[in-house]
Image (cartoon, rainbow, N blue to C red):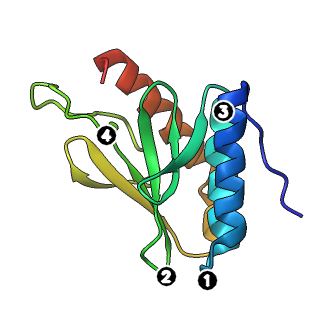
Amino acid sequence: MVTRKTTAGKNADKKTEDVNGFMDRLQHPLKPEIEAVRQIILGANDQIREEIKWNAPSFYVEEHFATFNLHAREFVHVVFHTGAKVKDNNGEGIKIEDPSGLLEWLAKDRCAAKFYSMSDVTSKRAAVEDVVNRWIESMKEKQL
């Protein structure tokens, strides 16, 4: 049985229940790895909440900042972004340190992390937690 973090508040609890149901129905060859990454992201910061957005588990504090892309079958794909709304960030984008090399930058305000196995997920745990917290902080600083 998978232990799932719950979030505070009735609305957040409902959203987590929705994600739990989505995960129960998900058919993906790397489902255990997806669940492990989900738990790492949720555990990285007690302000993080989750819901289903864009047909996948998505994470937010004030704005959405990370979403699974479940189309790939050979790896777990997490996209870090600045939410659904168009932002006026003067072309600066997000700048965070990534000493682990976890991220593949897709645009100034978007990048991705990939995980190929459970050992890959486990070995990148600290890097994911670090990136999640840096990403959230950068979004707050820029008020994205």
Which image quarter: residue 57? bottom right
Q: Is residue 118 visible?
A: no
Callout 1–callout 3 Cβ contact below 8 Å: no
Q: Which residue is mark 2?
A: 73
| Kind of residue indicated by mark 2 | Arg
| Kind of residue indicated by mark 3 | Ala
Q: Which residue is mark 3?
A: 12
Please tell me whether residue 24 is drawn above or below residue 73 in the rendered image: above
Label 4 vs 1, first from the N-terminus: 1
| Kind of residue indicated by mark 1 | Pro
Q: Residues within 10 Å of mark 2 (few under 14, many from 20)?
A: few
Q: Residues within 10 Å of mark 3 (few under 14, many from 20)?
A: some
Left or right placement of residue 118 versus residue 104 in this view: right
Q: Is residue 107 visible?
A: yes
Circle 2 SS class? loop
Callout 2–callout 1 Cβ contact below 8 Å: yes
Q: CA distance from mark 1 to mark 3?
A: 28 Å
